[in-house]
């Protein structure tokens, strides 16, 4: 992968690597990218609203939404690479020797830490996706109605990002021994999935009602 962040790659280069036999980037990286796209669309709605006299009453709201969406877009863009890096740490652990009991113990310790890291990144992606979906609601309610479909797409992408991240959390939890960690992580994922699904339905109903 190299030191360069995936967010700095050309789209075609990322897609080509994604479609290759390389194990990364994978679903977690794509989950982050999907969430970042949703955040970008929320910002787009605000950009088409801010500075327009017709929407003077909501300028402050739009500025706040924009700031939140841009912060989320930056976080999620970073997670596009962070997820791949987390997988790389797991791959390193898997290659560790296990010929002796000492080696086996050390390998297990390293793998447990790496797997937790690999679960924590998509967990953060899912929770960031919740925030994107939350911002899509006021964007759809108060933003330029000519861009309301973009707010609708944003919430769809946020929900997809959360669902995609959840799958990547789940597959890593299956290999983790720490039951308390597993329980906490999945509780947080269930909360994220519930909230993004709820907001998806609310925002889409609002969006279709305005189109």
Image (tube, grey):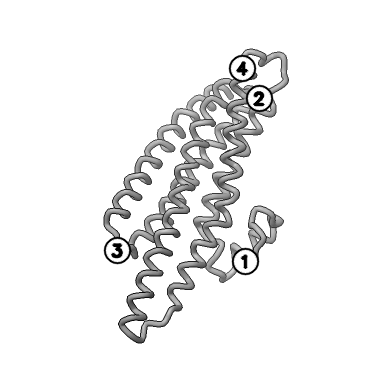
What residue is shown with label 2? Answer: 146
* Image disc number at residue 58: 4
- Dot 4 falls on a residue whose secondary structure is helix
Q: What is the quadrant of residue 63 in the picture? A: top right
Above/below status of 143 relative to 180: above
* Labels 4 and 3: the sequence-earlier one: 4
Q: Nearer the viewer, residue 28 or 93?
A: 93
* Image disc number at residue 177: 3
Residues at circles 4 and 3 in contact by the CB criterion of under 8 Å:
no
* Labels 3 and 2: the sequence-earlier one: 2
Residue 98 relative to residue 28: left or right: left
* Labels 4 and 1: the sequence-earlier one: 1
Marks 1 and 2, how far apart at CA? 40 Å
Residue 89 relative to residue 49: left or right: left
* Labels 2 and 4: the sequence-earlier one: 4
Residues at circles 1 and 2 in contact by the CB criterion of under 8 Å:
no
What residue is shown with label 1? Answer: 1
Residue at figure coordinates x 27%, y 57% from the top left: 179
């Amino acid at each position: 992968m190299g030191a360069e962040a995936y967010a700095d790659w050309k789209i075609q280069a990322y897609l080509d690597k994604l479609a290759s036999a390389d194990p990364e980037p994978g679903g977690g990286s794509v989950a982050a990218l999907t969430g970042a796209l949703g955040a970008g669309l929320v910002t787009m709605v605000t950009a088409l609203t801010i500075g327009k006299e017709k929407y003077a009453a909501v300028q402050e709201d739009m500025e706040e939404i924009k700031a939140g969406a841009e912060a989320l877009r930056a976080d999620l863009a970073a997670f596009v690479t962070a997820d791949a890096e987390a997988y790389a740490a797991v791959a390193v652990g898997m290659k560790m020797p296990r010929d002796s009991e000492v080696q086996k113990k050390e390998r297990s310790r390293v793998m447990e830490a790496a797997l937790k890291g690999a679960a924590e990144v998509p967990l953060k992606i899912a929770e960031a996706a919740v925030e994107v979906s939350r911002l899509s609601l006021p964007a759809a309610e108060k933003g330029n109605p000519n861009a309301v479909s973009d707010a609708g797409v944003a919430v769809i992408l946020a929900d997809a990002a959360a669902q995609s991240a959840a799958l990547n959390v789940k597959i890593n939890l299956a290999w983790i021994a720490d039951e308390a960690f597993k329980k906490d992580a999945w509780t947080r994922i269930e909360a994220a999935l519930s909230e993004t699904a709820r907001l998806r339905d609310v925002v889409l109903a609002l969006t279709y009602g305005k189109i």
